[in-house]
Each structure stands twice: as C-alpha cells, then as structure tokens.
Amino acid sequence: MGNCFKSSSNDDISLLRGNDHHDPALEPAPFVEPPPPYRPQQRMPIFHPSPGVSRPANQLTEDEQIKIAQRLGLINHLPTGKYDGTNKKAKECVICMNEFVFGDELRYLPCMHCYHRECIDDWLMRSFTCPSCMEPVDAALLTTYQTS
Amino acid sequence: MAHEQASLLLSRQLKELCKSSVDGFSAGLIDDDDLYKWEIVIYGPPETLYEGGMFKAHLLFPREYPHRPPKMKFVSNMWHPNIDQEGNVCISILHEPGDDKYGYEKAAERWLPVHTVETICISVISMLADPNDESPANVDAAKMWRENFEEFKKKVTRTVRRSVEEL
C-alpha cells in the first residue's frame, strides 16, 4: 500500500540566528565581549500538508501554504471554552486520556465532541477529522451552518 | 510537550495491560527502559486458520504518538495477504493520518489518535480472522488465498506450528 515515503525535516537553524557579528574596530579591544543579548531559540513550525509528509513552514509549496492557512482559519473558528464541570458527559480528553481539570482550555467540534485545545489543535493540523466519531470536521461545519 | 505526552500515554497503557490482560494477545516492552518499543504476542483467533498459533510481533511508536501511528512488524514467520514478506502489517488504521490528494483512503479509515496498543492488537486479530484481499501487502499470499485455498491452509498451518516451536 502506498504513502510510505518520508521527507526529512531538518531545520536550517543558521538562518534564524541572524547576524551577530560585531565590528572589532568599534569595540574597546581588551575587554571581554559581553554575552550576546538573550534570544529564545525559535524553531520553524513544522506542518503536515499530506499523510506522512512533515515540512518546516519555509519549505511548503504555494498550494500547501494555502491549504494550511485555510485549515488554521477554520480551526480558529471552532468554539473554545474552559472546563467548568457542567458537561457531565465529557470527563476526559480521549487524545491524552487525562481527565479534564477545572480551568483546562477545551475546543468543541461541530459534532459536539470536545478535547483539550492543545491536543485537538495539533491533531486537526494533521487530519481534519473528529477522533471520536470520525466525522470530517469541515463537512460537519457545513451542516451546522445549513441547519442554523 | 509532545514527547512527554507520548511516554505518559504509553506508560499508562503498559500499567493497565499488566493489571488486567485482554483476551487474544499479551503485551510488554522489548527493553524495560524504552516505552516506545513493545513486544506483542498475538494468539491466533479461535475457529480460524491461525488458531493455536502464538505470533510474536514488535510495535514501534514514534515520538509523535498519539498524533502519528506506530509500525507493527511480525517477528514470527507469517503467511497472510495483509502482512508483507518482511512481516510488516499493512492495515489502514496504521496509515499516516490525513487526507491524501488521490483520495486513496479516507481520513476516517486511517490512523486516529484514540488508538491504543489494545485497539491496534484487536484490529490485527480481526485482520487475521478476515483478510482484506483488495489491497494485499503480500500479493502471492492473496492470490493463493483466493485461488488455491487448500495450499494456503497448509502454509498457514505450518506457520502456526513454527510460531509455537520458536516461542
């Protein structure tokens, strides 16, 4: 069966570091150079444009960029909330298998299944499908628009 | 964070499977220090050709579990349309998630992050009982299954016997 190819996902970190060179002529020579200003190490986000393919953001084709931007937009439109214990049916996130704790950030899908926001957002970037009922999220979105 | 999530999930499954075993298979780690590599023994399902067999397999999880599927490979010799000559299991739930542009397999048929060692083993057991010859990983086995079932049966019986001897 197909789809067994892999792609390397090496980040070119050197591109992210910027140019830290100082002109020695401008510095008082005998002093030890002060440590460079603190910069949090930023890594290029990795996306998954199709099954088994993972690529850093700067190596996506134009079509893939559009698809991913649309996906991000759709995910952002899905309602979120904080767990307050009122929903008696949803007690745990089936992705991480942890029980919801008061104040946990949740994301609700159109099929009414809910998960930790962090758990489901990562999943939806790979597959736009509800892990519990396997309903495609975009199709479910359309039906909710049509009925409301 | 992803890394921690994977090892947490896997250690919890290990604990649960040790506490109460599930019919049809047994599971443990290949090496006690590595939660990502499991050894599974699948018991050939009753009333099938594989009955009586004890087939050893390895289940190798990626760091991105549960967002990506593990790979399953039989170490015992196997003869089955959906297991290739190297022992790799080819079932759709172990395929990388998402919608491929060729529409070869729907996203819903592929990997889902709710799968566990248990659900994977149960799928493999039902695959043994009920081969899918539409997309065979072992074409010769699929052909034999369809066209020369007696020969297929003989070959499977031999692997069943061997699996027990080798265990």
Image: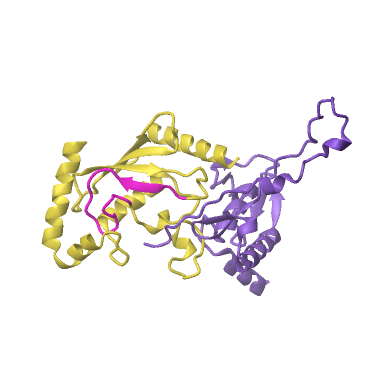
Q: Is residue A128 above or below residue A28?
A: below
- Residue at x-position 19% and y-position 48%: B51
- Residue at x-position 29% and y-position 49%: B87
- Residue at x-position 52% and y-position 36%: B8
Give the quadrant of the N terminus of chain A: bottom left
Q: Is residue A2 left or right of residue A35?
A: left
Chain A colour as displayed: purple
Residue lying farthest to the front in this orientation:
A25
Magenta run includes residue B33: no
Q: Residue B22 at what x, y percent from top left?
A: 34, 40
User: Is residue B12 visible in the rendered structure shown here?
Assistant: yes
- Residue at x-position 21% and y-position 62%: B140
Give the residues in magenta. Answer: B69-88
Closer-to-camera residue (B114/B28): B28
Prevailing secondary structure of the magenta residues: loop
Q: Residue A25 at what x, y percent from top left?
A: 86, 36
